[in-house]
Amino acid sequence: MPIIAKITPALCRAARGLLDMNQIDLAAAASVSKNTIVDFEKGRRTPTNNNLAAIQRVLEEAGVEFTNGDAPGLRLRKKKR
């Protein structure tokens, strides 16, 4: 799955906050170590492309929509009725 909008450490933290998801749950759902999430969010390292795509996929499937363009950001998707 190609990454369309670039996920940054700050966007990852913000997405988890919007979803009320902790680092352990995100790591488990993305099949990565908790240290991968912690180090990424602190800017210590960038995960591999596969791990980054898995993290973004989990957050998107949980309801976050990453936006791209001049001002990258995120928002919660509207729930379908």
Image (cartoon, helix red, strand yellow):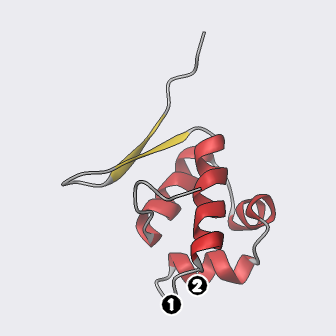
The Cα–Cα distance between marks 1 and 2, rounded to whole angstroms, is 5 Å
Dividing the image into 4 quarters, which one contains the N terminus?
Answer: bottom right
Q: Which residue extends farthest left?
A: 70
Left or right of 34, for residue 43: left
Residue 6 or residue 42, whichever sits in front: 6
Left or right of 25, for residue 68: left
**Where does residue 59 sit, x and y in percent of width and height?**
61, 50
Asked if labels 2 and 1 touch by Cβ distance under 8 angstroms, the answer is yes
Counting labels gives 2
Question: Does label 1 or label 2 sit earlier along the sequence?
Answer: 2
Q: Quick check: 58 above or below 24?
A: above
Amino acid under label 2? Answer: Asp
Q: Which residue extends farthest bottom?
A: 44
Q: Quadrant of residue 53?
A: bottom right
Q: Which residue extends farthest top?
A: 81
- What mark, if any, has residue 13 been given in the picture? none
Q: Residue at position x 44%, y 60% from top? A: 11
Amino acid under label 1? Answer: Arg
Residue denoted by label 2: 39
Residue denoted by label 1: 44
Q: Quick check: 45 above or below 63?
A: below
Q: Helix, strand, or loop for circle 1?
A: loop
Q: Residue at position x 50%, y 31% from top? A: 77
